[in-house]
Image (tube, grey):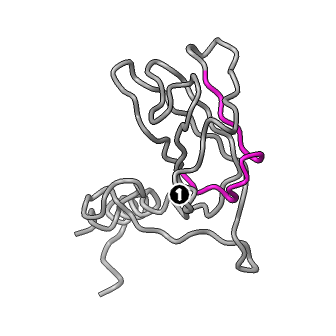
Amino acid sequence: MCCSATGWQTAVPPGNLFHITVPVAKNPDGSPITGPATEELVVDKNATPATMRLTYPAASDNKSRASLTVRKNYADAPIAVPESDWSFVDAKLTAIKLTSGDFGGPGSFGPTALYEFSYTARDPLVVGLGFATIRDIATFLRSAKADDLA
């Protein structure tokens, strides 16, 4: 029974023992929390993904507040992908796609490439609770004489 309440991955589907549903963190006044975020997409030689899913939604659809770069190797200098060559997938601002250009598009990110997307994110999730639950259960099992919740 305890294991079904100790999930810690927000990205896995519900019903999986690792899944957890958590609230979105807010500022004390209830306004959204925003801050810098960087996403990295490493494309396998046999893959051409159509979208880059973002961990957190973008705070704005203003593309001048974000940057997308590409390179072949980590040691290479990143090449800026022009704003005109990428877009957000939809109004949720949770993914981007290439729309044109020589960077894998249109329609897919190029194979054997390293993409980096920097942007202002919003709505961080309250995560890490599953690990705290496991810590507390382990402490209880190790040291408690009885369950005081009965």
| Residue 86 image-quadrant placement | top right
Q: Which residue is mark 1?
A: 90
Which residue is drawn at the image coordinates 60% and 19% (left, top)?
Answer: 71
Magenta range is 55-70
Q: Residue at coordinates 70% horizontally, 15% vertically from top-left?
A: 77
Residue depicted at x 70% and y 79%: 30
At label 1, counting other C-alpha atoms closer than 10 Å, the crowd grade (few under 14, some 14-19, many 20 or more) is few
Residue nearer the viewer, 120 or 145 = 120
Q: Position of residue 72 (x, y in %)?
A: 56, 15
Q: Is residue 60 magenta?
A: yes
On whether residue 30 falls in the magenta region, the answer is no
Compared with residue 29, is residue 118 higher up or lower down, i.e. above or below? above
- Is residue 106 depicted above or below 6 in this figure? above
- The amino acid marked with disc number 1 is Asp
Q: Is residue 65 left or right of residue 127?
A: right
Kind of element beneath mark 1: loop
Where, by quadrant of the figure, is residue 150 drawn?
A: bottom left
In this rendered view, identify the residue nearer to me: 9 or 59. 59
Relative image position of residue 91 (x, y in whole percent)? 56, 62
Residue 81 drawn above or below residue 39: above
Residue 143 quadrant: bottom left
